[in-house]
Image (tube, helix red, strand yellow):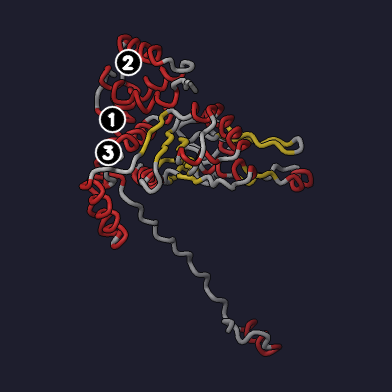
Amino acid sequence: MDAAGPRGGGAGSDHQAASAPKAKPRRATAKPARLVFPFSAIVGQDEMKLALLIAAVDPAVGGVMVFGDRGTGKSTTVRALAALLPPMKAIAGCPFSCDPAKPAQLCDACRASTRRVVVTVPVPVVDLPLGATEDRVTGALDIEQALAEGRKAFEPGLLARAHRGFLYIDEVNLLEDHLVDLLLDVAASGENVVEREGISIRHPARFVLIGSGNPEEGELRPQLTDRFGLAVEVRTPKDLPTRIEVVKRRDAFDRDSKRFVAAWTKEEAATRKRILAARRLLPKVQVPDATLEAAAQLCLALGTDGLRGELTLVRTARALAALDGDATVTVAHLRRVAAPALRHRLRRDPL
């Protein structure tokens, strides 16, 4: 039944519809935010949690690759971190969530705007599915509209949505080669360029790349492996108490999510406060020459390819020092992050 009368009611129903007072438009009710498992409640997986915290403090580290067994909480941990992070400031209406505090990194539309309204938005976490087309990832240009109206009509893609946030790829080792090449270009430049029929659109695309996968299902291309700042390994816990605690917490969350999340509010707030304090301290953290020399000696002894290993190791150790509240990077900081920063950069001898 329609609100104005039965369907197909003829002239009578038309008259009723014309004479009936107009109904007030209903206000759209916002859907409640989906609860995610608290980051602080995740049992074990200390190396993965630390790597994600470091990437949250300093995105220049270069992202995190997580390899390990199925069902070990890889995707759960990534989404838990995103829910934990404090919201960020962005320009209202911008599809790329441009940062008003960084004019040099604004998109063309925000740069040309004279009135910029600043809003607070959550940090984006965007999933890149394995079957995604290139247009869905980079965005699509409407060629007909551009030719007819002389206006660039652009539909932003996943890279636009992930700007200033996280781009998460599950089973990253199964990603198609052309998408791998595309991600390599964007990760290196921090900018996404879409070109169709002589028309070009470019926009900022700086994000923390998070990839997960099972090494038994396929190797990751060396070019993409090298682009990840940190690589961590996740294993199924072998001790009985840890396994029992994992099951207990997950079962409690599934049975009553609100109550479980509320029970971890204090720990989540403390971790969020720690991240914010580390971000403020990061520019002031000093790296002595002796620490730099130790990092270079370690990479030289291990035979790492290129110099990206030293850079990543130093940046990671600096972010770790900021998380710990230390103003100086020491060899102890290097030692704690050496494995995730260098394990995927070691030369492999097939013999």
Q: Position of residue 203 (x, y in %)?
A: 59, 35
Rendered view: 292 above or below 140: above
| Residue type at tag 1 | Leu
Instruction: Residue lying at the far bottom in this picture: please name it.
Output: 12
Please give left or right for residue 247 compared with residue 20 in the image: left
- Would you say the residues marked 2 and 3 are in contact, meaning their CB atoms lie under 8 Å apart? no
Evaluate whether residue 29 shows in this view.
Answer: yes
Secondary structure category for the residue under label 1 = helix
Q: CA distance from mark 3 to mark 1?
A: 10 Å
Please give left or right for residue 98 compared with residue 321 in the image: right
List the residue tagged with mark 2.
287
Evaluate whether residue 166 shows in this view.
Answer: no
Q: Nearer the viewer, mark 2 or mark 3?
A: 2
Task: Tell me the residue at 22%/53% (across/down).
Answer: 263
Question: Counting other residues with Cα less than 10 Å from the Cα at mark 2, is it few (<14), some (14-19), or many (20 or more)?
Answer: some
| Depth order, front residue of 71/145 | 71
- Would you say the residues marked 2 and 1 are in contact, meaning their CB atoms lie under 8 Å apart? no
Please give left or right for residue 291 compared with residue 342 in the image: left
List the residue tagged with mark 3.
273
